[in-house]
Image (tube, rainbow, N blue to C red):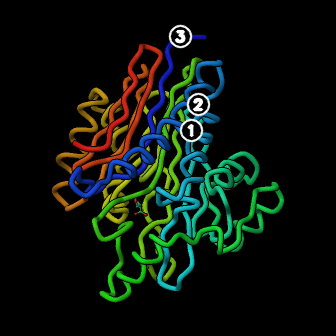
Amino acid sequence: MSNNFSIAIHGGAGTILRGTMTQALQVQYETGLKQALEAGYKILEAGGSSLDAVEIAVVALEDLPLFNAGKGAVFNNTGSHEMDASIMFGKGLEAGAVCGVSHIKNPVKLARAVMDHSGHVILCGAGAEQFAKMYNITYADEDYFYTEQRYQQWQEAMKEDIVQLDHTEKKYGTVGAVALDRHGNLAAATSTGGMTNKKFGRIGDSPVPGAGTYANNSTCAVSCTGHGELFLRCVVAYDISCLIEYKGLSLKDACDLVVYDKLVKIGGEGGLIAIDKSGNIEMSFNSEGMYRACRDSGGRNDLLIYR
Ligand code: ASP
């Protein structure tokens, strides 16, 4: 067992400006991020698995109305919620994901059950919810996901007939976590409500291994947030891993190249958190801000929102 471990979490990237944030709301965000980070960190400190650490951190964020995942998921075009989530373990490249689920309190838990028990990687919609029943995954009815703020965002989006990332200020409130445990195992998880007013069963990058989430013990673990279509087209999370594996880039150089160059060139706004096999942490974004926090066994302990 090594002494080296680290964790990073995000609560979405986008146009997050100091001027539009109240002191009280900022405290809520900071408290939520800190609780999620500490929940994951404790597991790692005790010698637990990175997979458990990322799951527990994402569950903590899904339970808050502040972020676009679980409780705070955005409304789709029919006034319902369709959530996507994924989890991946770097030891054997195991992965599980769900997309378009409407009645699952913690979609990341269902993604973990898909990984552990289904023999498949991605389950969607009604089938995924049926599978959830077999593994005692907590159901929640539509009312649980109602928040006044998301409802108003949806009303605004419908008026303009647009599909929006989280809300009018272009925030990507998706949540995610990446971790390295004392056993040298990397893991990543991501969970989202997707885009406000989304139609036709739209799915973004978050539940797609390699796009929004990736973990490989020989390279890194990555969780993304941003304009999903562009992140899918850039296969962002796997690209970071490939740049390390095939080109020998450092984690920082790989993240810089993808986030500030490749994504920007095709108009892909957003960011990501990543940890490499040595425990180095990157939290990169090309938007105005990203809710983010990280902590490692070497004493790094950051919680940041703005650029
Ligand atoms: N990437 C997510 C999606 O496109 C949105 C987000 O990160 O907020 O579904």
Q: Is mark 3 within 8 Å of ligand 1?
A: no
> How many angstroms separate mark 2 from mark 3 (CA)?
14 Å
Q: Secondary structure at mark 1?
A: helix
> How many angstroms separate mark 1 from mark 3 (CA)?
18 Å
> Which residue is pictured at 40% across the width and 24% down the height?
301
Query: Image quadrant for the N terminus?
Result: top right
- With 275 as the anchor, is 5 left or right in this view? right
Residue on which the image places disc 3? 3
Q: Are marks 2 and 3 in contact (CB under 8 Å)?
A: no
> Which residue is pictured at 23% across the width and 50% down the height?
18
Residue on which the image places disc 1? 54
Dot 2 amino acid type? Ser
Query: Image quadrant for the C terminus?
Result: top left
Lower sequence index among marks 2 and 3: 3
Q: Secondary structure at mark 3?
A: loop
Q: Are marks 1 and 2 in contact (CB under 8 Å)?
A: yes
Pick the residue in front: 262 or 271: 271
Q: Position of residue 200 (x, y in %)?
A: 48, 83
Residue on which the image places disc 2? 50
Dot 1 amino acid type? Val
Pick the residue in front: 17 or 122: 17
- With 259 as the anchor, is 211 left or right in this view? right
Name the mark on residue 192.
Answer: none
> Which residue is pictured at 48% across the width and 46% down the height?
176
Q: Is mark 2 within 8 Å of ligand 1?
A: no
Tell me the quadrant of ligand 1. Answer: bottom left
Dot 3 amino acid type? Asn
Q: Position of residue 279 (x, y in %)?
A: 43, 22
